[in-house]
Image (cartoon, rainbow, N blue to C red):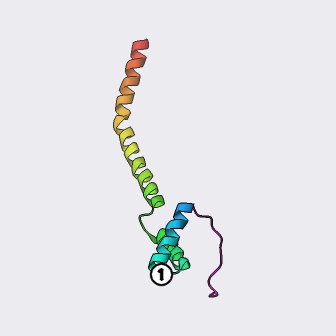
Amino acid sequence: MADNQRNISVQLDAEVLNQLESYVSKNACDIDFIVDEALLSFFNHPNNIVDQLIHGYLDMADINEELSKEFSICEQEADKRTIDFNY
């Protein structure tokens, strides 16, 4: 084993492990290589699920701010009518 590698232990879902073992067997490749490549892809892929969620929430924050600005006049009018109606 190279000096820049370390051993870890992980628990995989049985179906994931079956698929991994089947892939390795069919393609005559090393399981360590597949795991390394999968993790590198996860960490380096610009469209991973976490990034999508972050961008989605940031986009929604902008939309919500815009909507609240647009409807603040309506809210003020409703408040004024309610106050006028109660007096």
Could you classify mark 1 by the number of other residues whose Cα lies within 10 Å: few (under 14), some (14-19), or many (20 or more)? few
Q: Amino acid at mark 1?
A: Ala
Point 65% across, 77% down: residue: 7
Residue range (magenta): 1-13
Residue at image mark 1 = 28
Point 43% across, 13% down: residue: 86
Q: Residue furthest top?
A: 87
Q: Position of residue 23 (x, y in %)?
A: 47, 73
Give above or below for 44 relative to 66: below
Give above or below for 62 relative to 51: above
In the rendered view, does 9 fall on the left or right side of 27? Answer: right
Tell me which corner region of the image, top left, top right, bottom left or bottom right, holds residue 5: bottom right
The chief SS type of the magenta part is: loop
Point 39% across, 38% down: residue: 68
Residue 5 forms part of the magenta stretch = yes
Point 37% across, 19% down: residue: 81
Residue 26 forms part of the magenta stretch = no
Q: Secondary structure at mark 1?
A: loop
Q: Position of residue 49 (x, y in %)?
A: 45, 59
In the rendered view, does 47 fall on the left or right side of 35? Answer: left
